[in-house]
Each structure stands twice: as structure tokens, then as C-alpha cells.
Image (cartoon, grey):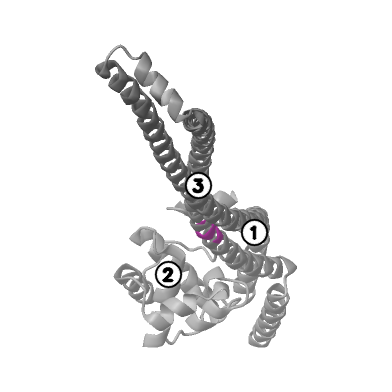
Amino acid sequence: MIKRVGAFILILSVSFTVIWSDVYAKNSTSDKIKEAQKKIESLEEDKEEAEQQASSLQSEANAIEGELKELNDSLQSVTDAITSLENQISEKETDISDATARLAAAEETKAKQYEDMKKRIRFMYERSNDDILSLFLESESISDFLNSVEYIKSISDYDREKLDEYKETCEIITTEKSTLETEQANLVALEEEQQEKKSELDTLVANTQNSLSETNSELAEAQSKADALALQIEEMEALEAELEKQKAEEDKKRLEELKKQEEELKKQTSSGTTTAVTVTSSDQAMLAAIIYCEAGGESYEGQVAVGSVVMNRVASNYYPNTISGVIYQSGQFSPVASGRFAAVLSGGLASSSAASAAAAVIGGTRNVSALSFRNVSSGISGTVIGNHVFF
């Protein structure tokens, strides 16, 4: 009868454990933690994408700014060239005006000299031979007469010389003026070319400035998006921490209940046997991988403690009785949910220290009797080893 009662109680206990575990697997806190972790991963991806876009836009903006500087430098050079040409054209206009004035003065002098010469020639030709005779007779000597005739000839030669001189001066001034006008025309043509180049550069500068403005606007938007995502990540991480703390409290209460049930079961049954654990090389690799994921940065003692928790659960009647079952139990180990455990396991990335800790606990070594652990920041009381508290 006692054996039957014990068996019945054991069956009820196991049934209760199965039902309780199923309920716990559907625990809203665990689901919320998973959702928070997935949301954080998604936000991290979006943030990284936004930051990459911002970095690309920053490089593009820097390139456009460099191009704009070169265009502005070219525009300044063209503007300076136009100013220089305008000054040269103005100087040519002044020189042409001076040449025109000098030419007019020379023409006027030439015309006056010509008129004076005509008068003198007309006077000389209008005089009769009697006048020449009178001049001869009035002269005191032949020398005096020849001097008078020579004087008249000198006047005529002077007039001719001056006319030739004025004619040559007019030709020189005319040539100078023509040269100046040609040079001015060339300067005007150069100025027109520079003006066209300036117009093209003005258009390029305006387009480049618009492009820079658009790029800076996109950059500001990308940076703003990255900042907003970073803020969301902080909020979600804070929420996850709060949920982890809440879940830790729930786990603690659950473990307390499990311990009570185990003690009650021990009192009601005379059998203290536990289910035998069959360990394969695959199980040992999984144990090493979970130890590495959870405590890879901890001391060897901390790694053995994590392995002890896994094996304590395997030995408990209220957890799966295999290492794989304990590790893959829903909502228990965050590296399993995040995919990191699978990556470490498939890549054989567990450290030699984690592998040694796994072998030790499989061989019977235990340094904690706890069934759970959390970060010390959770505020839960228990055995503290490194950055974990075991309870």
C-alpha cells in the first residue's frame, strides 16, 4: 500500500511538473523578454544601417564640399580675370580717346598749315614779273636779291616739310588708333569668353550647392534616425533588464516551490533514486558551448558553477533529464534564443576552459547546488561567483 501511494504521489508530482513547465514556457514575462531581445536585434540592425547610410552621406557631402571649393576657386579666378580685362578695356578706351584727340589736333594743324601754304602760294603766283623786277631793282645788291628769293623758296620748302610731317604724324596716330581698337576688340572678345565661362561656373556652383544642401538634409535625417534608434535601443534594453529582473523573481519563487515539492516528495516516498543521465560526446559539446556562452569571460570557478546548474537541473525531477533537454528548454537560456549558442556549437568555438569545466561537472564535480543564476545586477540574493549570482 505504501509503495502504491508513493508511486501515485510520484505520478502526481511528475504530472504537476509537466503541467507547471508547460505553463512556465508560456509565461508572459519570458515571451516579453524574447520579444524585447528580438526588437533590440532588429533596432540594432536598423541603427547600423542608418549609421552606414549617414557615413556614406557624410563622405558624399565631404566630396561635394571639395568640389564646391574648387568651383568657387575657379569662379574667383574667372571673376578676377574679367575685372582685369575690364580694366584693360577701360585703359584702351582712354588710349583710343587720347589718340583720337591727338589725331584730330594733328588733322586740324595740318589743315591750317595747308590753308596758310595755299595763301602764300597764291600770293606769290599772283605777283607779276614786275614785282620780281621791282624786288631786283629794290635790292641793294645781287646778294640781297638772292637772299630774298632764297627766303621765298625756304618758306615753300618749310610748308612742304610741315605738310609731310603732319601727314606722317596723322598716319602714325591712325595706325596707333587702329592697333588700339584691334587690341580693345580682342580684349572684349576675351571678356565675353570669360563671362560665358563665369556663367557656366555660376550654374555649376548653384547646382553643386543644391546637391550639397540635399545631401546634408539626407545626412541630418539619417543621423536623426540613428539617434532615435539608439534611444529606442536604450529604452528596450532598460525594459529587458526590468523584465529579466522580474523573471528572476518569478524563477526564484518557482524554484522555491519546486524545492518544497521535492522535499514533500522525499518525505512521502522512501525511494531517493534519481533518473540516470546518459551523457554522449554531443551532450558534452553542448554543455561546453552553453558554459562558454554564459560564462566565457568568467573564472574557471564561475564556468564550473554554470555547468553545475545545468547538471543540477538534469538531476532534478522538475526539469528535463537530459543535457540537451535542459539547454533547449523554452525560455531558459538567452544565448539559445539569440542564436549565439547554435553558432558556438556548430563552429566548435567553446574555449578549452569551458570544455574542461564541462568534463568536470559531468564527472561529478559541483560547486553550487543552485538551479538558476542571474547577473549580480539583478539584485537577487544567493551565491555570488564573478558576475553571476547562483540561487
Real-space CA distance between mark 2 and mark 1, rounded to the nearest whole angstrom: 45 Å
Please state the total of marks drawn on the protein image.
3
Q: Position of residue 387 (x, y in %)?
A: 46, 53
In the structure shown, which secondary structural element does the residue marked by tag 2 occupy? Answer: helix
The residue wearing badge 3 is: 181
Task: State which quadrant residue 32 falls in.
Answer: bottom right
**Residue reaching furthest to the top:** 140
- The answer to whether residue 385 is above or below residue 98 is below
Q: Is residue 222 above or below residue 363?
A: above
Label 2, residues with CA under 10 Å away: few <14, some 14-19, many ≥20:
many
Compare marks 3 and 1 and give the one earlier in the sequence: 3
What residue occupies the far left of the structure in this picture?
Answer: 143
Tell me whether the residue at label 2 lies in contact with that at label 3, contact meaning CB atoms closer than 8 angstroms: no
The residue under label 2 is 291
Element type where label 1 sits in the image: helix
- Distance from disc 2 to disc 3, alpha carbons, whole Å, reads 95 Å
The rendered magenta stretch, by its main secondary structure, is classed as: helix
Magenta range: 57-61
- Taking the magenta stretch, the answer to whether it contains residue 218 is no
Q: In this rendering, which labeled residue sits more in front, label 3 or label 1?
A: 3
Write down the quadrant of residue 222 in the picture.
Answer: bottom right
| Nearer to us in this view, 35 or 210 | 210
In percent of width and height, residue 80 lies at: 49, 42
User: In this orientation, does residue 357 appear?
Assistant: yes
Give the percent coordinates (x, y) of residue 1.
68, 87
Q: What residue did someone put label 1 on?
A: 218
Q: Is residue 145 left or right of residue 49?
A: left
| Residue 60 covered by magenta stretch | yes
